[in-house]
Amino acid sequence: MLSFIPAFLMFPVHFTLQMLNLGFWAVLIICLGLVKFLLPFNWINSVLSPIMHFMMFAFGVVSIKLIRLTNNVQWDCSVEGELSKDNWYLMMPNHLSYLDIILLIEFAASRIPAPKFFLKKELIWLPFVGLGAWALGMPFMQRYSREFVEKNPHLKGKDIETTRKHCKKFQTTPTTVINFVEGSRFTPKKQLVKASQYQNLLPPKAGGVAFTLATMGEQFTNILNVTILYPENTKHPMMDMLCGNLTRVFIHIDVLPVTDEVIGDYFNDVEFKGRFQTWLNQLWSSKDKFISQVGNSK
């Protein structure tokens, strides 16, 4: 355990180790991704994809080992329900930090199929991460404001079309589709701007989740309602982690059934849209109360 090292010394050492870990696995994944791109044959994909997923998992496992080495951190991880590598899951976590992604990859490594994140298009330019995610077949979403779409009506539904295209790719192999329903990382400033009715969450965006369920609902084995919390590092968990000051990580997963009430035509069926929004808001309200309970018990 190296957490005794002062933060001003720990940061450059830990940051360098994390970047070397990220860069090593990302370069290998990108190289194999280029092979898949240049040789788009099913048998090439079937051979290389498991290897690339192993590399992604290796990145997450090594990254967490580095965190454990450099931080005196308590890990609280619990699962309500059964998980399997052979199933399809829709994972819906709250979003607090880029650290969330590392935690979810490491969590998935020994429990569930390889995760596929829906990422903002701007992240394609993030060193190592962007091209690595592209090579792994993760969808990049271009988000438009309502005002922008009104001025450019031809762009209406582009996100949904991207979701449809990628969901079809996920239907042949057990997959964990991860959707950060809030659309952005939670901060008190964003909470105010979005006039969130929740104390610890941003309002959930129902459209993308509803469409994913409509496209793959019958194939999803379960919905994974994931709650992530850094109870003692609420302001800058990623920076605290790099400086060796991360003290507690809390992850709780509720394994929920995929019922008829969450599968339907969100965009054309007004009654279903109302029911789905009620279901999602109730889920988010329960998560908000749960986060408050965990935070108060720290």
Image (tube, helix red, strand yellow):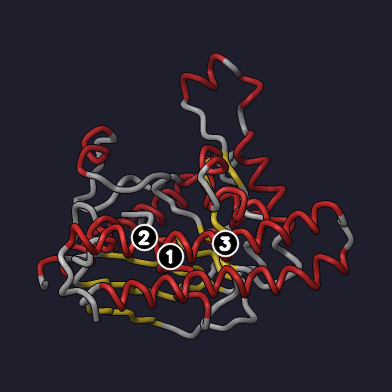
Image spot of residue 256 (x, y percent): 46, 73
Closer to the camera, 183 or 129? 129
- Residue 276: give its label: none
User: Up-down: is 64 above or below 152?
Assistant: below
- Looking at the image, do the residues carrying marks 2 and 1 touch, with CB atoms under 8 Å apart? yes
Disc 2 is placed on an element classified as helix
Crowdedness near tag 2: few (<14), some (14–19) or many (≥20) residues, C-alpha within 10 Å: some
Disc 3 is placed on an element classified as strand
Relative to 234, is 65 on the left or the right? Answer: right
Instruction: Report how far apart the C-alphas of labels 2 and 1 lie in the structure.
Output: 5 Å
Q: Which residue is mark 2?
A: 99
Three-letter residue code for mark 2:
Leu
Q: Which residue is mark 3?
A: 177
What residue is shown at x 68% (from left), y 40% (from top)? Answer: 161
- Residue 102: give its label: 1
What residue is shown at x 26% (from left), y 59% (from top)? Answer: 11
Crowdedness near tag 1: few (<14), some (14–19) or many (≥20) residues, C-alpha within 10 Å: some
Between marks 3 and 1 in the image, the one whose residue lies nearer the viewer: 1
Where is the N terminus found, in terms of image quarters?
bottom left
Where is the C terminus found, in terms of image quarters?
bottom left
What residue is shown at x 40% (from left), y 54% (from top)? Answer: 280
Instruction: Report how far apart the C-alphas of labels 3 and 2 lie in the structure.
Output: 18 Å
Closer to the camera, 127 or 281? 127
Image spot of residue 99 (x, y percent): 36, 60
- Looking at the image, do the residues carrying marks 3 and 1 touch, with CB atoms under 8 Å apart? no
User: Up-down: is 16 above or below 148?
Assistant: below
Relative to 252, is 38 on the left or the right? Answer: right
Three-letter residue code for mark 1:
Ile
